Image (tube, rainbow, N blue to C red):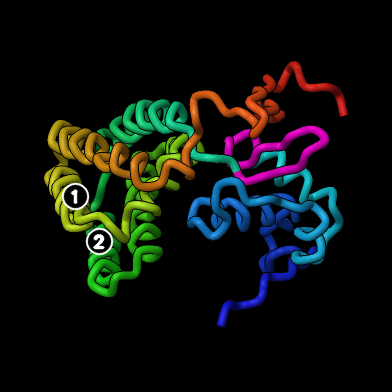
Amino acid sequence: MKSPEPRLSSSPISGPSMRAIPASARIYELLRERIVGGEMPPGAPVSEKELAERYGVSRTPVREALLRLADERLIDIFPQRGTFVSHISVEALRDGMVIREALERVAVRHAAAKVTDADISELRLILDRQQASEQASDWAGFHAEDEEFHRRVAILSGHPNLWRVARQEKVQIDRCRVLHLPISGRREMVMGEHRAILAGLAARDPDAADRAMAEHLGNVLPGLDELLRARPDYFDADVRTTSEGEPAAVPLRTVRRKDRPTR
């Protein structure tokens, strides 16, 4: 049975140095996870009122979360028509891969120069958990450990913000990868590529770690053409038209931020 939606408390996280996490940030993370994981498919309507009731908050933090998701091209906001989960942007996929490769190759080179034996052991544990998820056909767990491996490499580089930027820019890639994991034979290859990255790190060899990371990221989306054929409804069309043949409305997210009307 599906677990009930979480109600968001306004109380801060326990601990003397912890600040309260704004409701809008928590709603953003919850919705982002549902969209990336495919629980909210492309084209699904999104209601501010229903989300506010579901999470036990006012509509203001929901609206703030939706605007943030719109900036990530995960939500389309159409004036006078409604709000919908966006289709996957092929253009954003390609841009995301260029940005991700640039950032993560820098991160792994820096990490190779700083990594300790304890760090290597921690990375091995992550890959062990990923292997266990693969054997259990736990695709969500496999993806989560994949994310954790790359996040830890960024942290070990001494520049953790590299992962924050990469995570945001690769969100359309993640949507494709989640779609592809259950039907792909690539999971074993991913594990081998991760082990090659780890070997470069363990050898404290920035060049080897960089080569392994470049090869890994170059293979992230080998099945894009297959996905485009199998699930065209999940992707942006170059030109969308209405049933009457007229051009479709342009969502607010395509308007540059500086040109948006003042609220």
Coordinates of residue 141 in the picture (x, y in percent): 37, 66
Q: Is residue 160 visible?
A: no
Q: In what quadrant of the picture does the N terminus appear?
A: bottom right
Q: In what quadrant of the picture does the C terminus appear?
A: top right
Q: Residue at x 55, y 52 (%)?
A: 41
Whole-angstrom CA distance, mark 2 to mark 1, is: 9 Å
Query: Which picture quadrant has residue 218?
Result: top left
Q: Residue at x 36, y 31 (%)?
A: 97
* Pointer 2 or 1: first along the chain: 2
The residue pinned by badge 1 equals 198
Q: Is residue 76 left or right of residue 226?
A: right
- Decide: marks 2, 1 in contact (CB < 8 A)? yes
- Type of amino acid at the residue the image marks with label 2: Leu
- Taking depth in this image into account, of 180 and 171 the one nearest to the observer is 180
Instruction: Please report the bounds of the magenta region as a residue range.
Output: 70-85
Which mark identifies residue 39? none
Q: Is residue 178 left or right of residue 120?
A: right
Q: Secondary structure at mark 1?
A: helix
- Type of amino acid at the residue the image marks with label 1: Leu
Height in image: 110 above or below 149?
Answer: above
Toward the bottom, the furthest residue is 1
Coordinates of residue 108 in the picture (x, y in percent): 27, 38
Q: Is residue 68 left or right of residue 198?
A: right
Q: Is residue 41 visible?
A: yes
Height in image: 7 above or below 111?
Answer: below
The residue pinned by badge 2 equals 127
Nearer the observer, disc 2 or disc 1? 2
Height in image: 76 above or below 185?
Answer: above
Coordinates of residue 98 in the picture (x, y in percent): 36, 26
Query: Which picture quadrant has residue 8?
Result: bottom right
Q: Residue at x 20, y 52 (%)?
A: 186
- Taking depth in this image into account, of 253 and 224 the one nearest to the observer is 224
